[in-house]
Structures are given as structure tokens and as C-alpha cells.
Image (cartoon, rainbow, N blue to C red):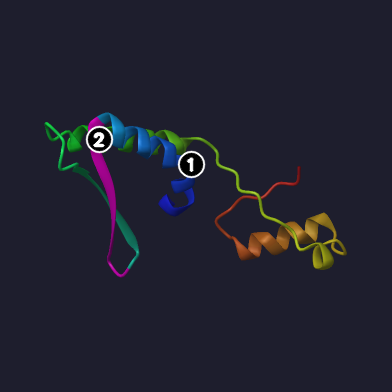
Amino acid sequence: VFAFLKPKLKLTIELINNKYCTRMEEKHCHDDHLIRIIFMPQIYAIADSSSQASEEFQYQYLICLETPQTKKITLKLLEDWKRKPKDVCRYFQHEHPKVDLSLK
């Protein structure tokens, strides 16, 4: 989930790092099944505000999770134009089972 939301959270992470004088690190663990997100103080920081940075990130991450997310999936014109929209939806639903698709 974090990999999907990371582009949307990029600016938020940058603002948190600037506000609390931290840097965010990602540590992959459990055979790359989990990502541990760690906020570390910068070497020039006057005080360690990494816990506040972590709390703010968790709050922003939860807000992002509650907001419906969309991702545009480009169609292969030469292949997909021949299909009916319903068939294309079924194909992508099979390819991306955790994503709810809708025709708009």
C-alpha cells in the first residue's frame, strides 16, 4: 500500500522533514513483505523531533488511506480497442484483483 501512496505522500514527507529537521528512511524487512518507515534527526538538528515527525506522518498516512485513490491504467490501443469496455474491465480486474474498477 505504501508503494502506491508514496507518490501522493512525497510532498507531505518533504514538508514533515523540513518542519521537524528529519530525514525519512525506508527499511525493508520480513523478506521485503513489510516496509519500516523511520524518521531520523538530521545531524545539524538542534533537537530530536523524530517522534513528532513520525506521529504527523502516521496521521497524514491514515488520512490518505481513508481517501479514495485512483490510478490511471493506460490501454494498449492496438489490442484493447477491439474489446468491449466490459471485457477490458474484466481483464484489468483479473490483472489487478485488489483494485475496484469502474467505467467512466
Q: Position of residue 69 (x, y in %)?
A: 55, 42
| Residue type, label 1 | Lys
Image spot of residue 22 (x, y percent): 23, 39
> Dot 2: within a 10 Å radius of its alpha carbon, few (fewer than 14), some, or many (20 or more) residues?
many
Q: Residue furthest front?
A: 44
Residue at 23% of width from left, 35% of height from top? 21
Cβ–Cβ under 8 Å for marks 1 and 2: no
Determine the residue positioned at 36% across, 39% down. Answer: 13
Residue to which mark 2 is pinned: 53
Q: From the viewer's perspective, is residue 89 above or below residue 23?
A: below
Whole-percent x, y for residue 72 in the image: 65, 49
Please report whichever mark, 1 or 2, sits nearer to the chain's N-terminal start.
1
**Type of residue at label 2?**
Ala
| Callout 1 crowding tier (Cα within 10 Å): few <14, some 14–19, many ≥20 | some
Residue at x 85%, y 61% (from the top left corner): 81
As for residue 78 lying within the magenta part, the answer is no
Residue furthest toward the bottom?
A: 31
Q: Which residue was labeled with disc 1?
A: 8
Secondary structure under tag 1 reads: helix
Q: CA distance from mark 1 to mark 2?
A: 17 Å
Which span of residues is magenta-colored? 20-31
